[in-house]
Image: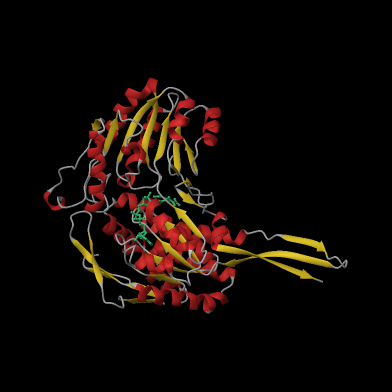
């Protein structure tokens, strides 16, 4: 992947920016140059949307549902066949351990295409018979039609997984897409262009424009009048900006946004499973998972023991090169993001935290010293009002606090502007059911975390998002219902 050039993918061709502008992509491992990326401007976005619109009204329209789903299966098979190339690209862009990308990111890229190919085949149709005032029969039936050109705007933490989670249902439903990958992770979206071309997806159905957000490709895409719908995954504050632009033209949005997710551990839990589950939720992907846990509440009788065990887990996680089999944690995505996370590490100390472990930057071997490395960190003793407990950090860290009863922990867990996910650990079945409906979040995991059945609704409450995607729920966003009334 060294010195690769990432170009836009428009109309099944790799093209440079019309302006000739490009930017550098650097490795999070050591800051070395990975390649240059075409920087999309207004003209590139216009070309991509035009290609998508032409495909929508042209060749793609002629594909039957069966033909579309067959193609989606072919995309999945091709991702499987080129698994190692996708793995290399994802690992190069993000620095994440190969063991993580090969179990989480790349298999989900393929699975997303299969799941949505299946989901669209099983959509029931409404049918109502009525009588006209003159006594004739009339029949109403509803059809689902594609929205049109869908803008897909993606973050950098799980690039292929999150992009295909949107592209697959969009194409399954007969839309065309223009993808704006994160400026930090151009690799797998570009590679997917080759796959689309190879399996015979018509030109213009899948397009990629690289670039930045405000004042760049992202903004030009969300403001383009020929974009019919916008699906976005990223920070809540970016969601606010996009929602304003989507308002012009009354375009529907699907938003998967930030979180400050609570983890709740009751004294009756399977202790070892809970420690392992919370460690995974706090530190997997170097804490850069929107569903991750940065607030942990532990029932008082096991609090001290739990904190000690979690500390042991954090300290046993090796930070290192992605190819090293013993590596459990990679770097953060960039030095800029590390600076943001370190600001919270310093703030925790200012706000009176006890630093149980970590709190800074690890000493790395010489070749890796320039990377965005960071220590997994655990705090106790912070007030709930601290920014460290209230704001999304998106790093490998958590604050752990004791609680005394169910009512108290429900209040603490829900005291947040976010509502994405929760992980709860208990052996009490009745309590699991009670907690499942008491926590105000889109996803509640009991004795598990990030356990995904792709047919289930996924999304956030409050400021964590708008809408639900997954299985047939995705069809609500990627299609529009049209009622046809036939009078006899
Ligand atoms: P981000 O919001 O900074 O960027 C996401 C994408 O939006 C990028 O492609 C970026 O270039 C683009 N963008 C930025 N400003 C834009 C604008 N004004 N108009 C159009 N596009 C714009 O997010 P990030 O830093 O890439 O990702 C981390 C964030 O994503 C975290 O907050 C995390 O919680 C969230 N996230 C949420 C979910 C979820 O499912 N809820 C999943 C993954 C990540
Ligand atoms: O598993 C998924 O489908 C999904 N959207 C995960 C989001 C993870 C956030 O970082």
Query: Can you name the residue that lies furthest to the left here?
Result: 366
In the depicted structure, whether residue 425 falls above or below residue 91: above
The residue that appears at 32% across and 34% down in the rendered structure is 399
In the depicted structure, whether residue 19 falls above or below residue 295: below
Residue 98 picture location, percent across and down = 30, 52
Foreground of the two, 62 or 290: 290
When asked about the image quadrant of residue 4, the answer is bottom left
Foreground of the two, 114 or 222: 222
In the depicted structure, whether residue 256 falls above or below residue 262: below
Residue 137 picture location, percent across and down = 83, 66
The residue that appears at 33% across and 72% down in the rendered structure is 41
Query: Can you name the residue that lies furthest to the right here?
Result: 135
Residue 119 picture location, percent across and down = 57, 58
**Quarter placement of the N terminus:** bottom left
Residue 224 picture location, percent across and down = 44, 70
Quadrant assignment for ligand 1: bottom left
Can residue 110 be seen here? The reply is no
* Relative horizontal placement of residue 364, taking residue 299 as reference (left or right): left
**Quarter placement of the C terminus:** bottom right
When asked about the image quadrant of residue 139, the answer is bottom right
């Amino acid at each position: 992947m060294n010195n690769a050039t990432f170009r836009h993918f428009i109309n099944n061709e790799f093209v440079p920016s019309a302006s000739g502008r490009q930017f550098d992509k650097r490795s999070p491992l050591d800051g070395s140059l990975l390649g240059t990326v075409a920087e999309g401007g207004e003209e590139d976005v216009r070309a991509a949307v035009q290609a998508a619109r032409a495909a929508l009204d042209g060749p793609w329209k002629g594909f039957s549902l069966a033909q579309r789903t067959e193609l989606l299966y072919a995309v999945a098979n091709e991702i499987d066949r080129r698994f190692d190339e996708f793995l290399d690209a994802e690992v190069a862009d993000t620095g994440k351990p190969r063991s993580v990308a090969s179990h989480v990111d790349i298999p989900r890229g393929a699975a997303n295409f299969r799941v949505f190919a299946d989901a669209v085949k099983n959509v029931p149709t409404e049918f109502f018979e009525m009588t006209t005032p003159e006594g004739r029969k009339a029949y109403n039936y509803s059809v689902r039609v594609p929205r049109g050109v869908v803008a897909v705007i993606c973050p950098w933490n799980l690039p292929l997984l999150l992009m295909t989670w949107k592209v697959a249902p969009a194409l399954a439903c007969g839309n065309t897409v223009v993808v704006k990958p994160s400026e930090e992770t151009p690799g797998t979206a570009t590679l997917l262009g080759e796959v689309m071309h190879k399996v015979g997806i018509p030109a213009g159905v899948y397009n990629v424009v690289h670039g930045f957000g405000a004042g760049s490709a992202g903004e030009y895409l969300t403001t383009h009048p020929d974009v019919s719908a916008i699906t976005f995954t990223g920070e809540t504050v970016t969601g606010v900006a996009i929602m304003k632009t989507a308002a012009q033209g009354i375009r529907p949005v699907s938003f998967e946004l930030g979180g400050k997710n609570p983890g709740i551990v009751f004294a009756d839990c399977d202790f070892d499973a809970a420690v392992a589950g919370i460690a995974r939720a706090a530190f997997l992907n170097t804490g850069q998972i929107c569903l991750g846990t940065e607030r942990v509440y532990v029932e008082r009788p096991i609090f001290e023991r739990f904190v000690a065990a979690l500390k042991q887990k954090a300290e046993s996680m090796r930070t290192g090169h992605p190819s090293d089999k013993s590596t459990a944690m990679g770097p953060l995505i960039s030095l800029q993001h590390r600076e943001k996370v370190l600001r919270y590490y310093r703030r925790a100390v200012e706000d009176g935290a006890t630093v149980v472990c970590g709190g800074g930057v690890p000493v790395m071997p010489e070749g890796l010293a320039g990377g965005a490395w960071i220590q997994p960190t655990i705090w106790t003793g912070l007030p709930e009002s601290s920014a460290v407990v209230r704001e999304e950090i998106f790093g490998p860290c958590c604050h752990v606090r004791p609680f005394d009863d169910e009512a108290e922990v429900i209040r603490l867990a829900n005291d947040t502007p976010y509502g994405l996910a929760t992980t709860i650990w208990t052996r009490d079945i009745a309590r699991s059911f009670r907690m499942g409906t008491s926590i105000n979040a889109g996803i509640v995991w009991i004795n598990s975390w990030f356990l995904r059945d792709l047919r289930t609704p996924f999304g956030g409450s409050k400021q964590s998002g708008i809408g639900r995607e997954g299985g047939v729920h995705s069809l609500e966003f990627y299609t529009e219902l049209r009622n046809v009334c036939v009078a006899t």
